[in-house]
Amino acid sequence: MSKHPRIARAAASTASLIWFFAVTSGCEKPAAAPAPAPPPFEVNVQRIESRDLEWTPSYLAQTSASRAVELRARVQGVIIERLFTEGRQVREGDVLLRIDPRPYQATLDAAKARVEEARARIAETDRAVLRKRQLVESEAVARKELDDALTAQSLAAAQLARTEAELSQAALNLEYTTITAPFSGRIGKTFVEPGSMVDSGSNSLLVELSRVDPLYVSFHVSEREILETQAALESGALALVDDIEHLRIAIELIDGKPYAHEGTINFRSVDIDPATGTAEVRAVVPNPDELLKPGQFVRARGRGWTRKASIAVPQRAVMLSGATAMVYVVGQDDTVEARPVTVARWQADEWLVQSGLASGERVIVDGLMKIRPGGKVKPVEKAE
């Protein structure tokens, strides 16, 4: 046995390692061949075709009553009767409130009496003038007496005119004690109750009345859009089905649901608001079921416009980054090109393209995240 067992074991281990590396180095496999390139991704494309499109510009709009008034007292007095329920429909001429009429009835009666007195005075002066004229002709009295009689006659006529005016005002004030609906509509908030003291000054507000059928829908169009629209009309790129005064307006509720009735334009501001750079446009919309309420926000979409020879692409095909828009176009050799485009605005589910695309080109509409510019794809054309 060796006197140095540790040295012997170390030598044996070293020999084993040398043998292992020698064996394994002889067993190394040759390098693998490169993997074949993956097949092109299949993408859906749409072939762009120039076509006439209905142009439906959309605007955020707000509704308002087509007629709204604050009914106010025109005479002083105490409210003695209220003949309506808040929020209910009333008809034109319906009596809404009554003010105590007794003081005004008394004033009217007194005015009538003064008128009768003035008429009697007129009759008296007429007779006096007739007598004086006869006496003057017979030279029984001086001419001055006839002149005095004529003056009295004129004063009596003036007095009659004044008392008749007072009578008319008294009758009008009595009429003002009965407050009626000036038009058919819906009663709003009431500011008085029976027993309230009202007057024709600061304490005159009685009740609000609004007509909500039809309803007004107002929106604002920017100065830039007005100029662009005028230029498009002049160039023939945009056409009107009817004259602009009869343009139809479709209404869309804020939840996206369409409203059943279309309206027509009935007002266009002639001025541009310098604070906003916009002009107001208003449509009148039927509201027979009163589904729309004054003050409600809706979307107003113009109808009756046609854009000639337009190019449109699905919204999902357009990538936006700030003010920049881009689409992926598939070339003749199925190579992908990133193409900057200029979009006008969108409607429905399409962007209208002003420049950057030509009729007949193929635009990728699905699978945008799988592709890169310069790469090959397998286009599958789908009609939109």
Image (tube, grey):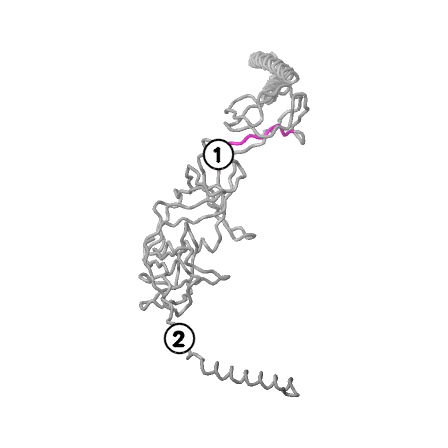
- Please name the amino acid that badge 1 sits on: Leu
Decide if residue 316 is in sight here. yes
Q: In the rendering, at what x and y percent does residue 263 appear?
A: 42, 39
Residue 207 included in the magenta stretch of the image: yes
Identity of the residue drawn at 42% across and 67% down? 372
The secondary structure type at the circle numbered 2 is loop
Front-lying residue, 6 or 101: 6
Residue 94 included in the magenta stretch of the image: no
Choose mark 2 or mark 1, whichever is in front: 2
Front-lying residue, 163 or 35: 35
| Mark number, residue 47 | none
- Please name the amino acid that badge 2 sits on: Pro
Identify whether 123 is placed above or below 247. above
Q: In the rendering, at what x and y percent does residue 285 appear?
A: 44, 37
Front-lying residue, 71 or 159: 71
Which quadrant does the N terminus fall into? bottom right
Identity of the residue drawn at 49% across and 52% down? 222
Compared across the picture, whether 326 is left or right of 310 comes to right
| Mark number, residue 34 | 2
The secondary structure type at the circle numbered 1 is loop
Q: Please provide the residue range marked out in magenta.
A: 204-215
Category of crowding for the residue at label 2, using alpha-carbon neighbours closer than 10 angstroms: few (below 14), some (14–19), many (at least 20): few
Q: Name the residue under label 1.
A: 291
